[in-house]
């Protein structure tokens, strides 16, 4: 009887070890819940890995849900938020490969024709020919030097638009802090224009 009890105890211990090891191999997308901002503080979830109910797709990018992310690597297009925002804070987690041409557009003045000329583009583009407006910059508004690299890892953008003050933080480092009053309000958009881009969480907090 004692031997059976010891055997059962040993099996239980082994099972516990295997379960703990298994937890360490959870997909990265499943661990980011711990960083989710509080709803009590006014944060709204625009994307949580489950559906695209808050977005409208334009263009021909092959956006699809996979492993808790929304990703695309073929075609060119945008996911446009169904709601418009004026003053807000925004947080987005993204992964891009070295060839990715992407970005987060805010205050779109024409949601059917998204460009850096009719909105603010917070860029994700490590290989941009002119790196001064590459990753971390606001295209045509706020340059970056040196340009940080975002490829092949998960990153977090924090974007604040309050009046004419625009602030961008990439992985905890401020990359843009500028005043510009060209665009006052509008939807936000996620871009795919080449390479692999993935977004796994997007939150926004109206101010």
Image (cartoon, rainbow, N blue to C red):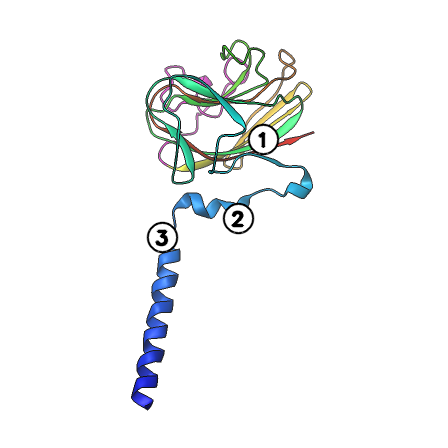
Q: Residues within 10 Å of mark 2 (few under 14, many from 20)?
A: few
Is 33 left or right of 11, judged from the image as shown? right
Answer whether residue 58 is visible to the viewer in this image. yes
Depth order, front residue of 76/50:
50
Whether pointer 3 and pointer 2 mark residues with C-beta atoms closer than 8 Å, the reply is no
* Mark 2, residue position: 34
| Chain-order first, disc 3 or disc 1 | 3
- Residue 204 falls in image quadrant: top right
Q: Up-down: is 79 above or below 113?
A: below
Residue 73 point in image, percent of width and height: 33, 25
**Residue range highlighted in magenta:** 123-152
Estimate the x, y position of residue 138 in percent, counting from the top left.
52, 19
Measured in 3D between alpha carbons, the distance from the residue under mark 3 to the one under mark 2, in whole angstroms, is 16 Å
Which label belongs to residue 25?
3
Element at badge 1?
strand
Q: Nearer the viewer, residue 134 or 77?
A: 77
Report how far apart the C-alphas of labels 1 and 2 lie in the structure: 17 Å
Q: Is residue 123 visible?
A: no
Residue indicated by mark 1 = 90
State the CA–CA distance, disc 3 to disc 1.
Answer: 29 Å
Give the residue drawn at x 44%, y 21%.
Answer: 191
Q: Are marks 3 and 1 in contact (CB under 8 Å)?
A: no
Say whether disc 3 or disc 2 marks the residue closer to the N-terminus. 3
- Lower sequence index among marks 1 and 2: 2
Answer few, some or many: residues within 10 Å of disc 3's Cα (few below 14, many 20 plus, some between 14 and 19): few
Residue for point 65% across, 27% down: 88
């Amino acid at each position: 009887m004692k031997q059976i009890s010891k055997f059962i105890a040993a099996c239980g211990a082994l099972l516990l070890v295997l379960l703990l090891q298994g937890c360490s191999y959870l997909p990265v997308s499943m661990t980011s819940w711990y960083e989710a901002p509080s709803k009590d503080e006014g944060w709204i979830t625009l994307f949580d890995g489950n559906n695209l109910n808050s977005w409208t797709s334009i263009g021909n990018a092959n956006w699809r849900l996979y492993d808790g992310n929304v990703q695309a690597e073929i075609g060119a297009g945008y996911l446009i938020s169904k709601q418009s925002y004026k003053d807000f804070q925004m947080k987005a987690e993204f992964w891009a490969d070295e060839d990715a041409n992407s970005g987060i557009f805010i205050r779109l003045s024409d949601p059917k024709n998204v460009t850096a000329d009719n909105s603010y583009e917070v860029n994700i583009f490590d290989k941009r020919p002119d790196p001064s407006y590459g990753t971390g910059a606001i295209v045509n508004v706020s340059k970056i030097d040196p340009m940080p690299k975002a490829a092949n890892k998960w990153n977090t953008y924090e974007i604040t638009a309050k009046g004419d003050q625009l602030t961008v933080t990439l992985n905890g480092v401020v990359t843009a802090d500028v005043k510009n009053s060209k665009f006052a309000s509008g939807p936000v958009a996620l871009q795919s224009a080449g390479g692999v881009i993935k977004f796994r969480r997007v939150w926004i907090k109206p101010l």
